[in-house]
Amino acid sequence: MATRLVLWDIDHTLVDTRGFGWALFAEAFHQVTGVALERQPRIGGMTEPVIFRETARLHGLSTTREEFDAFAPVLAELHLRHAAELRERGHALPGAASVLAALGRVPGVRQTVLTGNIRATAHVKVAAYGLDRHLDLGIGAYGEESEDRAELVTLALDRAGCPASEAVLVGDTPGDVRAGLAGGVRVVAVATGRCGREELRSAGAEVVVPDLSAHEDIVQLIMDGHRDGRAGAVRQRSR
């Protein structure tokens, strides 16, 4: 069986922190800039450096990479300190653990994350809900490594030694979809975030599912894709 690489977005694809992740961002932002966070950009699909810069701009601040580099360890420390509360207030999304576990039993499959989160917060988030056991986080690609999500796709492929033709990206935003397509990988979009199915399709997603709860179908979509006629039936049901 050919090796398959699955690249998972985290927020609103695998987990929902129910606003607590943003509360920790706000605290880190205040600690580093001295400004209380009052406004929030639309962050879906953005990487952490872009979120920080756009948030600062909304508050009348001009920042450089130096300010972000000061912000990132504060954000990481807050996530580590509040990991238990993160677990209590948030949750893994329905089907996420089942899909990860099922794929983990398939020979040749490797799973990792492709996320706008910085590495440290990404690790805390997936560990908080017990999802890290299924993921090879060492080959993941993280927000501090590039502002361009498509570059993160290339980075993850290189780390895994996997061709784009054998990779699948699963995410919930148009930014995820566009990054996957730009990186040459198939995309399975899930409408579990703030973007509806039509918005995800308009971004170029061939396959859009409402969530991960039908985990057997999701596994089939990821493993078979367009190569197996059975997936066509799944694709139609998912729409």
Image: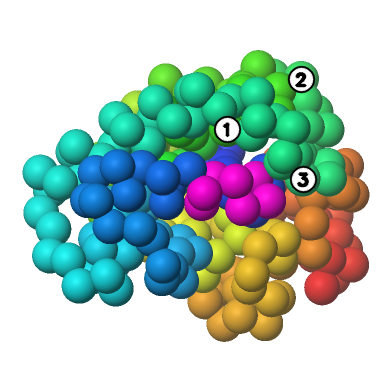
- Give how far apart the Cα atoms at labels 1 and 3 are: 12 Å
* Residue type at the position of mark 2: Arg
At mark 2, the secondary structure is: loop
Give me the disc on residue 93.
3
- Relative to residue 3, is residue 36 drawn left or right? left
State whether residue 211 is above or below residue 115: below
> 160 and 55: which one is in front?
55
Give the image location of residue 19, x and y in percent.
61, 53
Q: Residues within 10 Å of mark 2 (few under 14, many from 20)?
A: few
Q: Is residue 22 magenta?
A: yes
Q: Please tell me which residue is depicted at 54% across the width and 74% down the height of the picture.
A: 204
State whether residue 131 is above or below residue 113: above
Figure quadrant of residue 187: bottom right
Q: Is residue 151 visible?
A: no
State whether residue 169 is above or below residue 78: below
Instruction: Work out whether mark 1 precedes mark 2 in sequence or the reverse, and give the earlier one.
Output: 2
Instruction: Work out whether mark 2 precedes mark 3 in sequence or the reverse, and give the earlier one.
Output: 3
* Residue type at the position of mark 3: Leu
Residue at which label 1 appears: 125
- Give how far apart the Cα atoms at labels 2 and 3 are: 20 Å
State whether residue 193 is above or below residue 32: below
Q: Please tell me which residue is depicted at 88% across the width and 42% down the height of the picture.
A: 216
Residue at which label 2 appears: 105
The answer to whether the residues at label 1 and label 3 have Cβ atoms under 8 Å apart is: no
